[in-house]
Amino acid sequence: MARYLGPACRICRRQGMKLFLKGTKCMTEKCPFNKRGFPPGDHGQNRVKLSDYGLQLREKQKAKRMYGLLERQFRKTFEIASRSRGVTGEKLLELLERRLDNVIFRLGFATSRSQARQIVRHGHVRIADRRVNIPSFSVRPGQSIRLVGSEKFMQSVRQARELTKERPLPGWLDRHPEECLGTVVGIPKRDDVQFPIQEQLIVELYSK
């Protein structure tokens, strides 16, 4: 599957905010955003006024890169949200939050969504005693998510849990860190989204 392989910190600088794409590095002084918080490029420090389209595009790029999706995947998710009952923008964020790789990240078993995606792809996730290796798998209330693997792998998960123990747990998830077990207890709400996203701008962009 195609993935963005360029420098992750460049994305944060372009968006003008930390997206925590590098996990714990983003919380240290080594984070490039702390040293150069302006957009990359020769004219990065120049003030540029974005048009309405530019603001909409920037918001879509922020959400897409935050959750680690490519354009085709993101558009498909939006189309599903637009056909669902409810507010399209909030439904889009709900579908993104319910992705399995995002759930592993939000449970604190990985320091970044890219690491969580790797855990899923390598077959370390069990849902109802069934192996699931699809990062885009959409979890449902009542499902239990357990991580399994070698002792070396489980040790790395515990280390990640220790590094992310200060990360707040959303109300629609429950976890048992000693057992590397998480439970989906509800549906994510708009207030559960970790970063500020103006989803209405994304809806306006795709509605053109």
Image (cartoon, grey):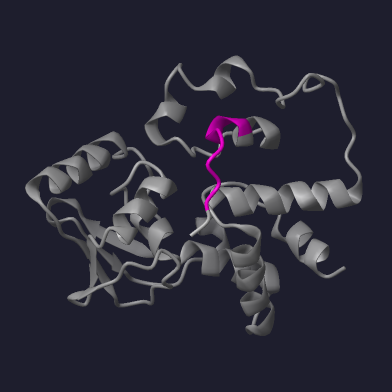
Residue at the image position 52 percent from the left and 51 percent from the top: 3
**Quarter the C terminus occupies:** bottom right
Q: In the image, residue 85 lies at what x, y percent?
A: 64, 84
> Position of 95 compared to 151: left or right?
right
Say which quarter of the image contains residue 175.
bottom left
Residue at point 50%, 57% (across, down): 192
Q: Is residue 101 above or below residue 154?
A: below
167 w.r.t. 60: above or below: above
Determine whether, in the image, residue 40 is placed left or right of residue 66: right
Residue farthest left in this picture: 151
Above or below, 90 relative to 42: below
Residue 135 in the figure: left or right of residue 71: left
Residue 163 in the image, given as x and y percentages of width and height = 28, 34
Instruction: Estimate the x, y position of residue 191 in percent, counting from the top left.
Output: 55, 58
Q: Along the horizontal axis of the image, is 55 left or right of 184? A: right
Residue range (magenta): 3-10
